[in-house]
Image (cartoon, rainbow, N blue to C red):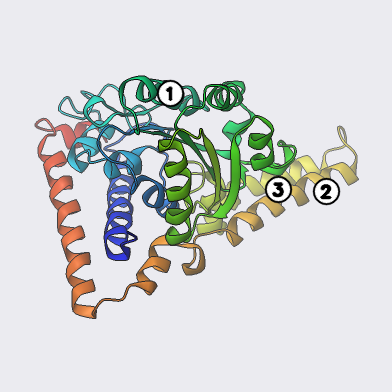
Amino acid sequence: MFDSVSLYRKMLTCRRVEEAIAGLWQEGLISGEMHLGIGEEGINAGVLDHLGDGDAVALDHRGTAGMLLRGVEAAAIIKECMGLEDGLCGGMGGHMHLFSKDHLAASSGIVGSAGPTACGFALAAQHLRPKKVAVAFFGEGAMNQGMLMESLNLAAAWDLPVLFVCRDNGTAITTSSPAVTGGSLEERARGLGVSGKNISGVDVEVVWHEAAVMLDRARSGKGPSFLRTTCLRPQGHFLGDPLIRMVHKPVAEMKPRTGPLVSAAMSSGGASIAQRLAAITKIMAMIGRTARTQLGSAHDPVLQMRKKLKITADDLAGLEEEVELTVKDALEQALQSLPAGGEEATK
């Protein structure tokens, strides 16, 4: 049964945990790139709410929310992101390689690898755990990876109980996806024998109901499905994305770039003036497109779900306070695991 309050709690928890992780990254307590799933909460919660014991999930480099929704402790995930020995994977995997055998959950930074991983989970379920399913999460850019196409084909050929979930934000890192992807993704899946559908990932209720149909289909032995869900990602491909920085701090970020751009435009050699102007126009269009797709209330799945809740203001405040306290406690546990002087050493 669709439970709006329960789903909102899950979505809000994912949002607050990832915001806490972002804060640690900004403070220098997490090194390397950081890929967040903010803006995808409706997709993650809407699909994973249907999974139970014995079901499996294969995640990509944005696996934090998926792990949380499968029941992995937030503190263990945060510690892993910080590279601590008592993290989920002993601090050896980081946020892109989260694994939990107990929860049948695995993630990888290799683009498209969720496909073959989910097929492996599904094949095991087919032989060892009847009525159990596997779910694969990936971005639209992964649909151009051979291993994912092979996974769709294999799943169809063997009637594997797997749901392929594509989170499409229209951008493959910094490249507009339509510029490098031909045709319709759901038609591509159908061409390989996998039932495909396209929906908005902003409305968790829509995602929940569609996922219910597809997962029931898989559990009953009718084979795999492909669900393309559209979304927006306010942080860009990773925290510190230069396009996002230009939108938030245009003067500070554009100042060091203005000189080289003007110099290149006025240079006597190289491309024609028309070509240079076209290139600059393209750059400005990318910045403008980024500005337009910054997460606003209309595209924020958490805020949209919050508006639909039919509970009292006091109950809502209590729920949100509980989530805040839970995340705060997980964050404090992680910080307490830092070695003496560790906070300064990581900066």
Q: Which residue is mark 3?
A: 283
For the question of whether residue 176 can be seen, the reply is: no
Quadrant assignment for the C terminus: top left
Q: Position of residue 268 (x, y in %)?
A: 87, 37
Q: Residue at x 38, y 33 (%)?
A: 133
Q: Residue at x 48, y 44 (%)?
A: 214
Q: Which residue is mark 2?
A: 277
Going by the numbered disc 3, the residue's amino acid type is Ile
Direction from residue 111 to residue 7 in the image, left or right: left
Cα separation between marks 2 and 1: 45 Å
Kind of element beneath mark 3 = helix
Foreground residue among 286 and 191: 191
Circle 3 Cα neighbour tier, 10 Å, few/some/many (<14 / 14–19 / ≥20): few
Q: Position of residue 259 (x, y in %)?
A: 67, 46
Circle 1 Cα neighbour tier, 10 Å, few/some/many (<14 / 14–19 / ≥20): many
Residue 255's disc number: none
Foreground label between 2 and 3 = 3
Quadrant assignment for the N terminus: bottom left
Q: Residue at x 56, y 26 (%)?
A: 148
Query: Could you tell which of marks 1 and 3 lies nearer the N-terminus?
Result: 1
Q: Are marks 1 and 3 in contact (CB under 8 Å)?
A: no
Going by the numbered disc 1, the residue's amino acid type is Thr
Q: Are marks 2 and 3 in contact (CB under 8 Å)?
A: no
Q: Residue at x 70, y 42 (%)?
A: 184
Q: Position of residue 44 (x, y in %)?
A: 40, 47
Residue 117's disc number: 1
Cα separation between marks 1 and 3: 37 Å
Direction from residue 59 to residue 78 in the image, left or right: left
Cα separation between marks 2 and 3: 10 Å
Query: Could you tell which of marks 2 and 3 lies nearer the N-terminus?
Result: 2
